[in-house]
Image: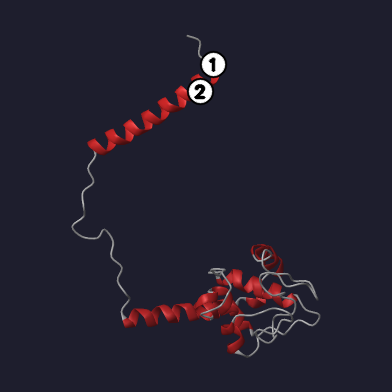
Amino acid sequence: MHFEWYHKLSLGILAALWLAYASNYLGDALVHAKTMDKPAYTAEAPEEGEAKAEAKTETAAAEDGLTLLASADAGKGAKLFGKCKACHTTEKGGKNKVGPNLWDVVGRAKAGGAGFKYSGALTDMGGDWSYADLDAFLAKPKAFLPGTKMAFAGLKKPAQRAAMLVYLRSLSDSPKALP
């Protein structure tokens, strides 16, 4: 009997499937999973005092970003902005992408970029983008503004936020004075 190449291929595939099925069956027969009596991990909510301490730490971290502005490097901020280029543009009169154009954002009205549909949360917030607000937003956008459309997790390091703020400040014909 003469086997053609496609018969050999079919037989090889069938044998591989049988081997996989037999291995699965044998594994199930030899290993029996035990149910746990209690959860392996439990999460506890922080006590009220701990929550206040965490809030003070976050506030201190935001202040640290502002105190570092005078010594921050706009070049480092420009490099960090590489993460943001997928959603934002920075050219004067540039188009909006998934996020608004950030030219002259420091001191601009929140939800004030032309031609971009902002989230209701930002529209309702009002006010201008101060250094402190931008620092807090960059640290943790969803904590600063619940309901924001921005998916970025944030910049945890105050030095990175300071560099980003100095870079954003430079995106203007007349940069705003540092605080």
Q: Where is residue 47 shown, x and y percent of the image?
A: 31, 79
Q: Quadrant of residue 26?
A: top left
Q: Quadrant of residue 172?
A: bottom right
Q: Amino acid at mark 2?
A: Leu
| Residue in the foreground of this view, choosing between 49 and 89 | 89
Q: How many marks?
A: 2
Q: Amino acid at mark 1?
A: Glu
Q: Where is residue 146 shown, x and y percent of the image?
A: 51, 80
Mark earlier in primary sequence (1, 2): 1
The residue furthest left is 37
Horizontal side of 114 relative to 145 (left or right) equals right
| Residue in the foreground of this view, choosing between 148 and 153 | 148
Please tell me the numbered disc located at residue 19. none
Horizontal side of 17 relative to 84 (left or right) equals left
Horizontal side of 5 relative to 131 (left or right) equals left
The residue furthest bottom is 127
Q: Where is residue 142 shown, x and y percent of the image?
A: 52, 76
The residue shown at (46%, 23%) is 12
The residue furthest front is 1
Please tell me the numbered disc located at residue 4. 1
Q: Which residue is mark 2?
A: 9
Mark 1, secondary structure of its residue: loop
Q: Badge 1 local density, few (<14 within 10 Å), some, or many (20+)?
A: few
| Residue in the foreground of this view, choosing between 100 and 156 | 100
Give the CA distance from mark 1 to mark 2. 9 Å
- Image: 82 above or below 69: above
Q: Where is residue 93 shown, x and y percent of the image?
A: 80, 76
